[in-house]
């Protein structure tokens, strides 16, 4: 029972929260469930094609190619590629984790994969125009430029910060994932 | 369906057709692998999105804008960063919300910090992310994004 709850932390907390807010205001519970359904539906719409591409990527792209493009000695080329892969993305960050795993499995360098994840989370090129029209050009420019620099720096530091053993562990995990 | 979804479906379907004509066996194997990792992720994703749904029912835009007002100062910045770090929103929800917050009297640095963290810092993903990589990697990625948010706030304070 204990491990079951531990493995389903979010489910347990969610149910507890639902019970609590039902006592406070039942309308809040309905709103919460409506929100959750909406979130899950939009996730179920956007995520399947991502996994379809993960599957195709896995069978078609040889490891050598990814090692050459994004591996240890890929240099700036690897980062640029990680930037565009992350930037032309759709879907929540959590959908990017399996993609990150397959990249590592195919021999991409951890710092490039981390950079990809960070870019995916907040520098989405297809909606750049939408970002500017909503929050304005000034704020968009400030946010995007700062984040690009911080992410590049973060990725470069990660290269030194994570030990060989840790990176090897990521590879083993990626190997076992798919 | 959003434009985002239409684009990604078009690309996926085109790739699938090309792959199918090139090698049926390989395509089937790819489809199997893709659906396997999709199914594997579902038990993790569903409770997570339930949790986020509840969170967003409690943390409503009007609730956030009362916290991030012009007078909220340093505490408002901390609150903006915290709410943004805990919650997750797709950009099509987050950006209009940012505008709404500003129109409802939210201050620029507070809202900017919220906008950056709501996209890039995902504490709700922490458990999943540590399982995929490790705790250090999950903390590191979130920390880097958080530092980015603080730099954005500082610049916004100077500019606005």
Image (cartoon, rainbow, N blue to C red):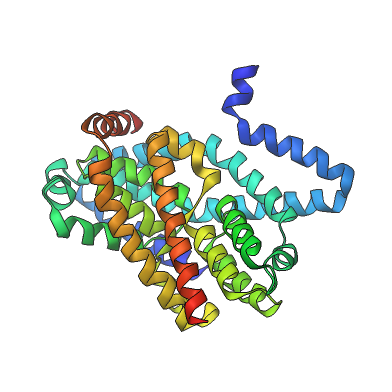
What residue do we see at 88% from left, 46% from top?
A: A24
Is A166 located above or below residue B149 in the figure? above
**Residue B117 in sight:** yes
User: In the displayed structure, does residue B44 sit left or right of residue A80?
Assistant: right
What residue do we see at 45% from left, 73% from top?
A: B155
List x then y, in percent, for residue B122: 51, 50
Quadrant in the picture for residue A123: bottom left
What residue do we see at 67% from left, 80% from top?
A: B103
What residue do we see at 81% from left, 38% from top?
A: A19
**Residue B24 in sight:** no
Is B8 located above or below residue A22 in the figure? below
Quadrant in the picture for residue B95: bottom right
The count of marks equals 0
List x then y, in percent, for residue B45: 54, 41
List x then y, in percent, for residue B115: 54, 65
List x then y, in percent, for residue A96: 40, 49
User: In the displayed structure, does residue B96 sit left or right of residue B31?
Assistant: right
User: In the displayed structure, does residue B71 sit left or right of residue A131?
Assistant: right
Quadrant of the image for the C terminus of chain A? top left
Q: Nearer the viewer, residue B68 or A50?
A: B68
Quadrant of the image for the N terminus of chain A? top right
């Amino acid at each position: 029972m204990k491990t079951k709850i531990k493995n389903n932390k979010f489910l347990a907390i969610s149910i507890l929260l639902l019970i609590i807010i039902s006592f406070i205001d039942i309308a809040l519970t309905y709103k919460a469930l409506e929100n959750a359904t909406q979130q899950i539906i939009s996730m179920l719409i956007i995520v399947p094609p991502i996994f379809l591409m993960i599957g195709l990527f896995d069978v078609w792209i040889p490891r050598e190619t990814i090692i050459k493009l994004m591996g240890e000695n890929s240099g700036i080329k690897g980062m640029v590629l990680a930037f565009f892969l992350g930037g032309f993305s759709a879907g929540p960050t959590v959908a990017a984790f399996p993609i990150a795993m397959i990249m590592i499995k195919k021999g991409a360098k951890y710092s490039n994969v981390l950079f990809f994840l960070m870019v995916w989370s907040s520098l989405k090129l297809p909606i750049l125009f939408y970002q500017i029209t909503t929050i304005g050009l000034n704020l968009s420019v400030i946010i995007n430029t700062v984040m690009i620099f911080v992410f590049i720096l973060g990725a470069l530091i990660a290269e030194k910060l994570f030990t060989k053993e840790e990176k090897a562990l990521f590879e083993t995990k990626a190997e076992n994932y798919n | 369906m959003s434009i985002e979804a239409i684009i990604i479906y078009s690309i996926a379907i085109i790739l699938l057709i090309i792959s199918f004509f090139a090698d049926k066996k390989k395509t089937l194997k790819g489809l199997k692998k893709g659906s396997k990792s999709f199914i594997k992720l579902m038990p993790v994703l569903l409770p997570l999105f339930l949790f986020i749904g509840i969170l967003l029912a409690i943390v409503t835009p009007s609730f956030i804008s009362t916290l991030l007002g012009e007078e909220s100062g340093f505490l408002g910045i901390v609150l903006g960063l915290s709410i943004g770090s805990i919650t997750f929103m797709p950009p099509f929800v987050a950006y209009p919300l940012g505008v709404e917050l500003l129109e409802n009297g939210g201050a620029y640095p507070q809202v900017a910090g919220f906008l950056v963290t709501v996209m890039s810092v995902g504490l709700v993903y922490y458990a999943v992310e540590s399982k995929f990589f490790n705790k250090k990697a999950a903390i590191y990625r979130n920390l880097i994004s958080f530092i980015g948010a603080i730099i954005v706030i500082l610049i916004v304070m100077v500019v606005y």
